[in-house]
Amino acid sequence: MSRRILEEELKRKSVFRDAGKLLPDYVPASLVHRNKEFRWLAQVFRPIVENRASQRALITGGVGVGKTVLAIKFGSEMKAAAKDRKVDVDYFHINCRKDKSDYAIYAKLVQHYNPRWPYHGLGPEKLLNMVVSHLKTQDKFLILVLDEVDYFIQLNGPDIVYALTRAAEEAGERNRISLVAIAKDQSFLYRLDEATKSTFMHNILRLPNYTAKQLQDIMEPRIEEAFKGGAVDTEVVEMISEAAAKRGDARLALEFLWRAGMIADREGASEVSTEHAREAKTEIHPEFKKEFLRELQLHERLLLLAIARKLRITDQAYAITGEVEKSYEVVCEEYEEAPRKHTQLWEYYKRLEGLGLIELQSSGVGQRGMSTKISIPDVPLTWLEKELVSNLKRK
């Protein structure tokens, strides 16, 4: 039975070409909306290649703003560019949530350079000296990324940063280790000694949250790599980008997109629809609360039902107020209620928006008399319609 299920799933048609292109550990060929920040890193670390001088920088920002992928991309490109100039620059990335001690980090560096080196039983200082000696002997320079360094320092204190920035100082040698620290913010710096803190304070790169348009630009090339041609409509991309823009989080946008594709596959669909996107958002962040429906007045429920039906029937991310109000009149006739005037409906729109049940946006120039777009991004429309109909029957 298990094998049969597995075979059925493996033979099932999919909207994906390569779903792995949407996962957090995938590094795209080019970084979208991070060229300015990449250039800043290139300027800061240029002395490694030109003068064999170590450098330090701190990258900060919220979740999903591209801190890690920027560092990975920069490290790999810097390594290649230095090689072209006959300078041996290595790059190594450590996640401090996985390697939670000084010993774990130094041991990983030792293994990186020579897996056969005996390191068990040696102290952190000895392990670091082995790395420093290897870099000197091989005439190498290392760009070491400490990802989530704020977590590490909170757990262990700041000694590792101090040691790495002064790794060759006692021997009177040049320091061959450059640091890129990644943290949510710079509040951890107060734990560092003044000299080390001063070095980072001069080189802090703050990554801003992405806008909805930027998230859309990030998703589009990923969609080409991850999905089959024509499987994802523009409206789906717009809906997901608007939802993820509340946090400015590209990782969240890609997760919405991946999950929406999985839902489409589960249903045997050939395309990812706006309804799949709504369901994906509900699965990841179930923000829609049934108790809000019970708080609504009769005509607020009728209006919400009209919006849900309009969006479901058209399979679009947005509906225009004028179109919704025609649908609302039909719903009122169905429930034998006299429809309210436009001015009253606008108060209902604002209350529904205030409860987080709908989103309102200006539709721009050229929409006379229908100047507002309405969306329901947080919940599957079929579920909402069913709940409202059941609710109205009880009413």
Image (spheres, rainbow, N blue to C red):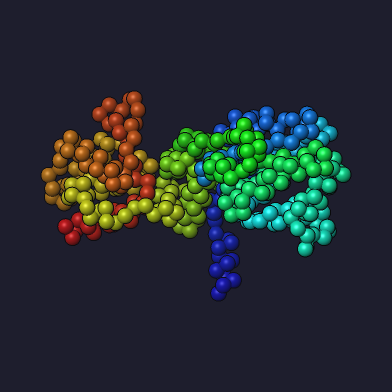
Question: Furthest-right residue in view?
Answer: 137
Decide if residue 225 is in sight here.
Answer: no
Residue found farthest to the bottom = 1
User: Residue 50 in the image: x percent, y percent?
Assistant: 78, 29
- Which quarter of the rendered picture does the N terminus lie within? bottom right
Q: Residue at x 56, y 42 (%)?
A: 190
Residue 174 placed where, x, y %?
80, 37
Image quarter of the C terminus = bottom left
In this orientation, which residue lies closer to the viewer: 226 or 112? Answer: 112
Q: Is residue 305 above or below residue 32?
A: below
Q: Which residue is at a point 25% across and 29% down the rendered structure image?
A: 369
Which quadrant of the figure has residue 358? top left
Residue 9: horizontal and vertical position, in percent? Answer: 55, 63
Does residue 196 appear to the left or right of 291 in the view shown? right
Which sits in the foreground, 316 or 67?
67
Question: Residue 289 at x, y = what percent?
Answer: 31, 55
Q: Which residue is at the far top?
A: 365
Q: Is residue 139 visible?
A: yes
Identified at 82% across, 39% down, the residue is 172
Horizontal relation, residue 3 to residue 390: left or right: right
- Compared across the picture, whether 133 is left or right of 239 comes to right
**Residue 183 appears in which quarter of the rendering?**
top right
- How many marks the image carries: the answer is 0
Tell me the residue at 87%/44% (across/down): 137
